[in-house]
Image (tube, grey):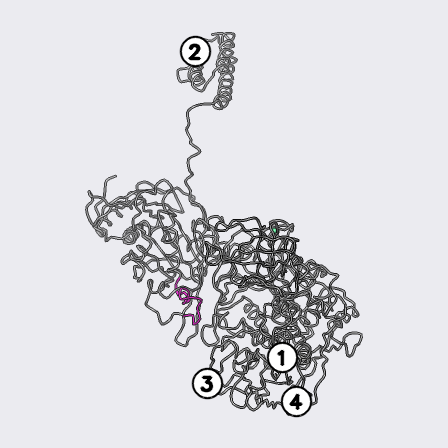
């Protein structure tokens, strides 16, 4: 909310304080000053009133004029681009050497399309008097050429732009802010005059009011003003409205807006002659009822919306916006019905959001208007219209009052205040602070006080609210920073956090960098990966955009996209992981979440740095990632890990395997399908894996039981053979184990290759077998016997050709 | 050979060692004296030619001599090897060959560091689902019935009562409804608001909230000390905190918390917009109405709560200018977090 300091000064004496001081006092008592704006500018001596002696069209331009301007002592030739320049008018004139405020440029002698120009005729915008202007500013003829502009124009003003928190609806007015200062500075508040003389004509005879929906309108007041001479508002009022961001329209409307800004009470003025039956009905709209609002748009209403209607039709949407047909007509003199009412906050909010309207009026009603304010604001507006528009006020006010309002009483415990603030504040000091806020103490004992809250502080309902008031006015900077004096141990179990952290740490050690993606993405991206369970997706009804339309049910699409994006940005290789949640909707519509780990590799990441030119094969790429999964599960003591060939729509056929942990499938690993990979023009295989986190972490707390270091040496034998490619590593291990004695403690694959010599569909495998006993040193002879038996079994069962070493 | 001759030979040999200028010469000296066919083994073989009476002394001297030469050669060897040589065996400028570890995401890093800091103050980590309900996310947090944060334009409603949590405070509600005081937790986690993404806004972000509720008095002063400790640990020992009154539905009094600017140390700079302070957190004393919602007796418990954005801390601490960088996953950015 914008608050011009000069306006504030009408109600509270603050002229002795600097703007900075005022802003800090407000900010540190809870009303944040977002910015301090200067409106208008200091003008130097080169800005004077000029008289346009002559103005002729420029020869080489269809929009420029060549003028002669007199500053009272000399005449200057000036080229001017404004359409409204003509001979005889008095204008603001900047002589050569003047510095234009705001932009800061200095007026110099210039040559415009071949004509010399010595100065500039200014618009209101150029003088920082308005946001924008259509042409140059024109003074009335009473001013003298040569008068410094400084003397004619209003002095520069400072406007505070405030952020009013949701609870402080009482601060949505200049008087509200003045009240804050009254409390902060302990100075008296001066309220504006609301006095006027009433005529003899009773208001009841001039207008009839009926509130048919008192639940949505607890109070409706109306005054009738006759013979209102509408027209242009006085300059000071227009200027104040403009400084607050409200456009000046005409005197009557301006007064209602002015009083709303001043007091916080939204008002509305109806043209009484245009109200059918000279009556007002406050009622719910009929379903489908239409009204053309002041913004010229025809709006359809429903029966939950409150309207102000005359005998025939709705003439305003209550608390939100007036209707065009009962609008005050700027020409001539008329009779005005001035509405000052209290509308239900929820109802106004509902209606405004349904109609997509956000007016200054509904902003105040939504957040709560002082229930006691209607009459004061009505009087204030009336007084202004009497003074400036010559209005004749009908006697009395129609007041439909069904309010059930009494001031809130709150019991305050002095000790509780001290405990919560952590400050040894005296009882008297607390009550002094509350009284400065117009919170009156009705009763007081040695331990507590019964406090009565003023009507405008709708936010004060509990003891805690009063404690907050005391704390903020006492000054939060004075609250000491006590050393925490709490027990250092919390007994709550948070192992899940540290287990997840352990998994993250291991992945980092394995060379994977942590990625993080949004929880939502587009349906299209998910479709490209997996369309098997579209109905189980959690679609967001009101997404920010279709790109973020669905909660993810897999981490893989974004993982692949990030790796692909890195590749397209000339990153040679990358290994990423993400730990994140996925979402699925069940048949009943409930959404379930699960935490997963995704892994992915792009480029020759598994290779040594100087071996990266050789093409990466499908097999080695997928084995890198398999290796990472194995290392991770091993280090997490997750249990027995196996892999089983499977299929996944996003994976290359034949290059995907389920990850099976302790007999349960917890995810899959494979190569991204070539079609998806080509989307990022990637030639190298991209291995991806996704695993459920919970089973991975199930053994993380397991304590390792140490086995003794082998006491006897191992004897090693190598065997290399050529076999059919259909013979898997797993087959070989099984075969060897079946033939081996218990002393065979380790089988390691040390070599694998294919070549032309070996032939198509065949490969060479080499294994090192380690024999070791825990009881004695084995002899060469017994190892040889076992080895021969193993080799023979391999030949017989797997039909391998043993290679001579 | 006599003992005198032996002495002379001994002196000569040590002189030769001392004079060897490079490793090659030294090796020649070694071979001449100690090699298989060297002087020392040869003399040993000639033992029988030595007078019988001299033999024990002779033998002892030869052995001693051998040790002296060996020691001298070894010492000289180290000296010679230090001498400059043009022959490079190890190009130590070659890139090393070991894999580099990965880098933690800045968001994880802030969360883990924060958890460690608060753990030292006795706070446990608590977690809850991303999908929440109206009661936990709004009602129990005393959100006014018409508060705009509940609007469709601000919150992702997911059908029925379900929504994507807009803050991690519902975890506080979950913890309080399931545990008796004292409850001392921080709740890091992912949160969602219907913001259009730009340099400082993201519809998907993270928060850390803290809650301490006890049956003993807990005051604003304790809150200030807790956040001051966090500020120092997270942003450096000179960081300070400042409270400004504010409004949040679930705390009363409510404050906004500024940390003194870690870049300029409060002098004023671009990062802190010349104020010397950076707005970091919202905090306050838990509103008694929240206690009523979770079944605590408002008259018998005291507590504070605070909350801040993880991305904001990461951006301020690491000088990240745009929140979108955190979700772009460009490894050239991520790798810098090692
Ligand atoms: Zn700074």
The Cα atoms of the two marked residues, 4 and 2, are separated by 148 Å
Q: Which mark is residue A203?
A: 4
The Cα atoms of the two marked residues, 4 and 3, are separated by 33 Å
Q: Earlier in the sequence, mark 3 or mark 1?
A: 1
Nearest-to-viewer mark from 4 and 3: 4
Q: Earlier in the sequence, mark 4 or mark 3?
A: 4
Q: Are marks 4 and 3 in contact (CB under 8 Å)?
A: no
Nearest-to-viewer mark from 3 and 1: 1
The Cα atoms of the two marked residues, 4 and 1, are separated by 19 Å
What secondary structure predominates along the stretch shown in magenta?
loop
Q: Which mark is residue A229?
A: 1
Q: Which residues are magenta?
A: A539-554
Task: Determine if marks 4 and 1 fall on one subunit.
Answer: yes
Q: Does A242 sit left or right of B108 as displayed? A: right
Mark 3 C-beta to ligand 1 under 8 Å: no
Q: Which mark is residue A288?
A: 3
Q: Earlier in the sequence, mark 4 or mark 1?
A: 4
Disc 2 crowd rating (10 Å Cα; few below 14, some 14-19, many 20+) is: few
In the rendered structure, the residue with mark 2 lies on which chain?
B
Q: Position of residue A541 (x, y in %)?
A: 43, 72
Q: Which mark is residue B327?
A: none
Q: Which element is circle 4 on?
A: helix
Q: Nearer the viewer, residue A718 or A707?
A: A718
Q: Position of residue A694 (x, y in %)?
A: 44, 62
Which residue has dot 2 on it? B46
The Cα atoms of the two marked residues, 1 and 2, are separated by 143 Å
Instruction: Name which quarter of the figure residue A668 lies in.
Output: bottom left
Q: Which element is circle 2 on?
A: helix
Nearest-to-viewer mark from 4 and 2: 4
Q: Position of residue A532 (x, y in %)?
A: 32, 68
In the rendered structure, the residue with mark 1 lies on which chain?
A
């Amino acid at each position: 909310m914008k608050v011009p300091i000069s306006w504030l000064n009408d109600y509270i004496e603050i002229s002795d304080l600097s703007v900075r001081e005022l802003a800090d006092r407000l900010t540190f008592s809870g009303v944040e000053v977002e910015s301090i704006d200067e409106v208008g500018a200091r003008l130097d001596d080169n800005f004077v009133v000029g008289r346009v002696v002559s103005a002729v069209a420029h020869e080489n331009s269809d929009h420029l004029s060549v003028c002669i301007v007199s500053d009272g002592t000399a005449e200057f030739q000036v080229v001017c681009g404004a359409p409204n320049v003509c001979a005889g008018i008095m204008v603001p004139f900047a002589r050569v050497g003047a510095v234009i405020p705001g932009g800061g440029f200095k007026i110099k002698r210039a040559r415009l399309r071949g004509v010399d120009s010595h100065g500039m005729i200014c618009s209101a915008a150029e003088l920082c008097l308005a946001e924008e202007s259509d042409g140059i500013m024109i003074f009335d003829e009473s001013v003298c050429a040569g008068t410094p502009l400084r003397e004619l124009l209003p002095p520069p003003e400072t406007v505070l732009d405030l952020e009013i928190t949701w609870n402080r609806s009482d601060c949505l007015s200049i008087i509200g802010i003045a009240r804050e200062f009254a409390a902060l500075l302990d100075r008296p508040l001066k309220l504006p005059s609301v006095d006027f003389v009433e005529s003899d004509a009773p208001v009841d005879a001039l207008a009839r009011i009926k509130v048919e929906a008192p639940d949505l309108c607890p109070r409706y007041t109306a005054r009738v003003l006759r013979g209102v001479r509408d027209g242009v508002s006085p300059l000071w009022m227009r200027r104040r409205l403009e400084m607050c961001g409200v456009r000046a329209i005409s005197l009557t409307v301006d007064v209602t807006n002015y009083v709303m800004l001043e007091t916080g009470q939204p008002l509305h003025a109806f043209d009484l002659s245009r109200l059918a039956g000279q009556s007002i009905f406050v009622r719910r709209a009929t379903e489908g009822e239409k009204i053309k609002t002041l913004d010229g748009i025809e709006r359809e209403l429903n029966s939950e919306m409150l309207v102000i209607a005359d005998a025939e039709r709705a003439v305003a949407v209550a608390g939100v916006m007036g209707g065009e047909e009962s609008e005050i007509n700027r020409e001539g003199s008329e009779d005005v019905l001035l509405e000052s009412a209290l509308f239900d906050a929820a109802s106004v909010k509902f209606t405004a959001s349904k109609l997509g309207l956000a007016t200054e009026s509904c902003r105040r009603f939504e957040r709560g208007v002082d229930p006691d304010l209607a009459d004061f604001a009505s009087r204030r507006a009336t007084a202004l219209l009497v003074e400036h528009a010559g209005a004749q006020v009908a006697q009395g006010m129609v007041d439909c009052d069904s309010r059930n309002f009494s001031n809130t009483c709150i019991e305050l415990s002095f000790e509780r205040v001290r405990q919560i603030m952590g400050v040894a504040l005296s009882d008297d000091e607390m009550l002094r602070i509350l009284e400065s806020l117009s919170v009156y103490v009705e009763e007081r004992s040695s331990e507590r006080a019964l406090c009565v809250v003023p009507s405008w502080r709708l936010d004060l309902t509990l003891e805690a609210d009063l404690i907050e008031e005391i704390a903020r006015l006492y000054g939060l900077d004075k609250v000491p920073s006590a050393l925490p004096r709490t027990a250092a141990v919390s007994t709550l179990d948070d192992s899940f956090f540290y287990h997840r952290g352990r998994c993250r740490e291991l992945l980092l050690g394995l060379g994977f960098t942590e990625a993080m993606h949004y929880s939502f993405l587009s349906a299209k991206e998910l479709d490209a990966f997996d369309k098997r369970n579209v109905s189980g997706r959690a679609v967001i009804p009101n997404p920010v955009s279709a790109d973020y339309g669905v909660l993810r049910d897999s981490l893989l699409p974004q993982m692949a996209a990030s790796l692909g994006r890195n590749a397209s940005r000339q990153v040679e290789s990358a290994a990423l992981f993400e730990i994140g949640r996925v979402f699925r909707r069940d048949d009943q519509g409930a959404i379930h979440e699960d935490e997963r780990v995704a892994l992915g590799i792009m480029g020759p990441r598994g290779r040594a740095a100087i071996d990266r030119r050789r093409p990466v094969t499908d097999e080695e790429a997928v084995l890198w990632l398999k290796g990472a999964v194995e290392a991770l599960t091993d280090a997490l003591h997750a249990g027995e890990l196996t892999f089983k060939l499977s299929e996944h729509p996003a994976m290359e056929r034949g290059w995907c395997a389920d990850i099976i942990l302790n007999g349960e499938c917890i995810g899959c690993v494979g190569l991204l399908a070539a079609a998806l990979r080509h989307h990022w023009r990637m030639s190298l295989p991209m291995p991806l894996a996704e695993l459920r986190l919970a089973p991975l972490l199930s053994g993380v707390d397991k304590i390792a039981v140490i086995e003794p270091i082998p006491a006897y040496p191992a004897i090693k034998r190598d065997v290399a053979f050529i076999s059919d490619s259909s013979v898997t590593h797993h087959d070989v291990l099984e075969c060897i184990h079946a033939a081996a004695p218990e002393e065979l403690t380790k089988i390691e694959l040390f070599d694998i290759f294919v070549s032309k010599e070996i032939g198509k569909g065949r490969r060479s495998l080499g294994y090192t077998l380690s024999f070791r006993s825990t009881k004695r040193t084995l002899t060469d002879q017994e190892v040889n016997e076992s080895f021969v038996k193993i080799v023979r079994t391999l030949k017989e069962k797997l039909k391998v050709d043993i290679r001579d070493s | 050979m006599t003992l005198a001759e032996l002495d002379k030979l001994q002196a000569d040999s040590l002189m030769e060692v001392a004079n060897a200028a490079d490793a090659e010469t030294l090796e020649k000296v070694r071979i001449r004296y100690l090699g298989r066919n060297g002087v020392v083994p040869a003399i040993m073989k000639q033992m029988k030619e030595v007078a019988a009476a001299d033999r024990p002394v002779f033998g002892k001297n030869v052995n001693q001599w051998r040790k002296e030469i060996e020691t001298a050669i070894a010492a000289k060897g180290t000296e010679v090897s230090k001498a400059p040589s043009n022959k490079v065996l190890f190009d130590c400028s070659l890139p090393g060959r070991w894999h580099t570890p990965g880098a933690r995401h800045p968001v994880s890093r802030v969360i883990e560091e924060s958890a460690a800091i608060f753990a030292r103050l006795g706070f446990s980590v608590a977690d809850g689902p991303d999908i929440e309900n109206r009661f936990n996310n709004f009602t129990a947090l005393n959100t006014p019935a018409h508060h705009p944060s509940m609007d469709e334009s601000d919150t992702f409603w997911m059908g029925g009562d379900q929504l994507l949590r807009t803050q991690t405070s519902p975890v506080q509600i979950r913890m309080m409804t399931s545990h008796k005081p004292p409850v001392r937790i921080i709740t890091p986690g992912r949160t969602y608001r219907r913001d259009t993404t730009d340099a400082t806004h993201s519809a998907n972000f993270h928060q850390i909230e803290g809650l301490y509720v006890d049956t003993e008095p807990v005051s604003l002063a304790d809150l200030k000390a807790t956040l001051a400790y966090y500020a120092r640990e997270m942003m450096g020992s000179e960081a300070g905190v400042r409270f400004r009154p504010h409004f949040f539905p679930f705390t009363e009094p409510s404050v906004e918390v500024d940390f003194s600017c870690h870049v300029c140390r409060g002098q004023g700079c671009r990062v802190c917009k010349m104020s010397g302070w950076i707005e970091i957190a919202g905090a306050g004393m838990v509103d008694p109405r929240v206690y009523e919602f979770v079944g605590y007796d408002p008259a018998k418990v005291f507590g504070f709560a605070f909350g801040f954005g993880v991305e904001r801390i990461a951006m301020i601490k690491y000088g990240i200018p745009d929140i979108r960088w955190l979700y772009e996953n460009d490894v050239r950015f991520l790798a810098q977090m090692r």
